[in-house]
Image: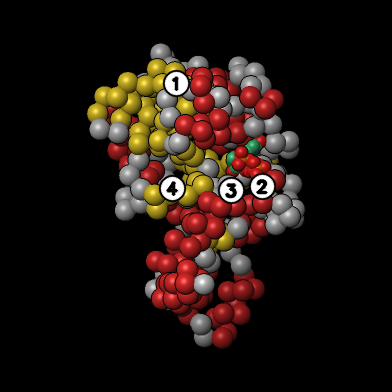
Amino acid sequence: MIRKAVFPAAGFGTRFLPATKASPKEMLPLVDKPLIQHGVEEARAAGVRDMIIVTGRGKNAIEDHFDVSFELEATLEKKGDGKLHALIRSISDLADFFYVRQNLPLGLGHAVLRTMDLVGYEPFAVVLSDDVIDAKTPVMRQMIGIQEKYGAGVVLAIQEVPRDQVSRYGIIKGKRIAEGVYEVEDMVEKPKPDKAPSNLAIIGRYILPPAIFPALQATQPGAGGEIQLTDAIRSLIGKERVIGYQFKGTRYDCGTKLGFQMANIAFALKDPELGPGLRAFLKKEKVR
Ligand code: UTP
């Protein structure tokens, strides 16, 4: 049973500057819904009740987004817009939200370590909201199924990536034990293509055991001078069963401008209101 999910959201989002100068990257909208809400809804659909968000300076909009907006709700109610009122209320009703600050962005591992007291001694999920995964069965639900089936301490969402892109990811070395399931033997953060043990990259979804916290405390800064989550997970291999799982679904890397634009187009094309107009526009553009 996974009851808690951690959402690291304290990074600077430099690849989206100037948009992220004063607003959080996690609040960039996919069509009309912020990236982080997509992640929270995915976790909720997997049975997670408590959402723990790691924030920093300039991230207040995230807290406001998941809070009750009294003035807005009162205005919509007065206008008689019941549908929009219900939609707005449903956001704060999604789950229980908890916040912890990471004063300096010292890395993903450091961000996760900040949640130690809030998570306590139980397994938990980590969701990076800039990886948006469109899937029939929410990916976190798929991963919980794998955790239970294999009695795994750690489950990592993995995906094949082109060889020339391995240096952007944590890469696993593993033994295939079933269709899409790997027993992880080793992993390396951001390897050079000729040093990478495979092209199976870790994507932004993790199930972790409480043992990750002492492992993070013992982890020295790695690639880029940051405390890397990958390094701490690596130190658990042999002590916990670590499974890499090739999830079913389409992943969009919304941490890059190109991935973000592709996700917006894909989601808008699926939207009954926007789809036909956008499809017609794209056809016209192709002719041009
Ligand atoms: P990224 O590597 O995408 O960093 O972090 P970033 O700062 O968000 O974006 P760029 O690279 O500058 O464009 C992956 C996730 O980990 C969080 C980020 O907020 C993002 O959700 N993170 C990263 C932290 O919470 N703290 C950190 O110290 C680093």
Ligand 1: quadrant of the figure: top right
Q: Residue at x 51, y 19 (%)?
A: 195
Q: Which secondary structure lies at badge 3?
A: loop
Location of the N terminus (image quadrant): top left
- Which amino acid, by three-letter code, is at mark 2? Arg
Q: Extreme bottom residue here?
A: 79
Mark 2 C-beta closer than 8 Å to ligand 1 = yes
Which residue in the structure is indicated by mark 3? 256
Depth check: give the residue in front, 25 or 18.
18
Q: Which secondary structure lies at badge 4?
A: strand
Number of other residues with Cα within 10 Å of mark 2, as a class: few under 14, some 14 to 19, many 20 or more: few
Question: CB of mark 3 within 8 Å of CB of mark 4?
Answer: no
Which numbered dot is residue 197?
A: 1
Number of other residues with Cα within 10 Å of mark 1, as a class: few under 14, some 14 to 19, many 20 or more: some
Q: Which secondary structure lies at badge 1?
A: loop
Which residue in the structure is indicated by mark 2? 15
The CA span between labels 3 and 2 is 7 Å
Mark 3 or mark 4, earlier in chain: 4
- Which amino acid, by three-letter code, is at mark 1? Pro
Question: CB of mark 2 within 8 Å of CB of mark 1?
Answer: no
Which numbered dot is residue 251?
A: 4
The CA span between labels 1 and 4 is 22 Å
